[in-house]
Every structure is written in structure tokens, then in C-alpha cells.
Amino acid sequence: MHGKFTPASEAPRETLDWGSLGWCSRPSNNGAKQIVAIEVTLAPGGGHAFHKHPNQEEMIYVIDGEVEQWLEQERRTMRAGDSVFIPPDTIHASFNTSQGNAKLLAILGPAIGGDTGYQLQEVADRAPWNTLR
């Protein structure tokens, strides 16, 4: 394979209770081995609670809106053009503090963990993460 174009209309989409995901790159839709790229929409007040990716690094780039971003126990407000790098096995969370949708681009690597290439471990129900917000 020499690459693959993915029109927006063909990108796999997922609706969650806190927003939606548009899978730009993952093994099952383009054969990616190193890069998982996800267009993330956070609904107003919604967010991806505390979690980690044990064997993947991640970069989150804010496209639109305002996001309360956590990196371990450090909290920052991120706006369009801001980004954060998250090393493997580092707990983090993203919450939309905008009146409208917030849009992010999340890029993870390497692509591991099956068809999505995405490895996730939720920790929001554990201390101290369940007391921070």
C-alpha cells in the first residue's frame, strides 16, 4: 500500500455520551502501524475523564473551543492552537469549558491494540482522580 485518502464522509465515526470521535487514521481503515489520529468533538460540559494509554504517547491539539486539560494533577486551559504532549502511561483528561462544541485532534503512536490501534485504561473512578474535578 502506498497510502490512502480518507474523505470525511468515509471516516468511521462514533458517538459517545460526552461527544464524538472521527477516526482519521487507524489500522482497520487505512492499515496504519504507527499513527492513530482522531478528530475529537467534546460537547459543552462534556469530556474524556481521567485515563491513560499504557504503551502509547499522545499529542492533543485544540482546533476550536476552550478545554480544561489535565496532565497528571496539573490543570491548564487550552484554546485553539494550543497543544499538549502526553508520554506513555501518563494520566490525563480533557473537558470542554466552552458554550459550544470543542474540537481537538488527538494523535497517538504507535498504533496498537487491535482494529482501532488505540489502547486505553480508564482511571477516573480511582483516587486521587475521582476527587480532582
Image (tube, rainbow, N blue to C red):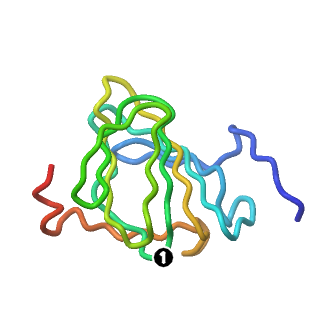
Neighbours of disc 1 within 10 Å: few (<14), some (14-19), many (20+):
some
Residue at 31% across / 53% down in the picture?
A: 93
Residue at the farthest top position: 99
Say how many tags the image has.
1
Q: Is residue 100 above or below residue 11?
A: above
Residue 34, quarter of the rendered image: bottom right
Residue at 68% across / 65% down in the picture?
A: 28
What x and y, as percent, mark residue 108?
55, 61
Residue 121, quarter of the rendered image: bottom left
Secondary structure beneath dot 1 equals loop
Which is more toward the observer, 76 or 13?
A: 76
Residue 127, quarter of the rendered image: bottom left
Residue at 46% across / 44% down in the picture?
A: 83
Q: Is residue 25 left or right of residue 96?
A: right
Q: Is residue 49 left or right of residue 103?
A: left
Residue at 74% across / 60% down in the picture?
A: 30
At label 1, the amino acid type is Asn
Q: Is residue 2 above or below residue 21?
A: below
What x and y, as percent, mark residue 100?
37, 24
Residue at the farthest left position: 131
Q: Is residue 130 left or right of residue 77?
A: left
Which is more toward the observer, 11 or 61?
A: 61
Q: Give the residue number, with chain letter if any, for mark 1.
A: 55
What x and y, as percent, mark residue 115?
61, 69
Q: Is residue 3 above or below residue 79?
A: below
Q: Quadrant of the N terminus?
A: bottom right
What x and y, as percent, mark residue 27?
68, 66
Which is more toward the observer, 85 or 6?
A: 85
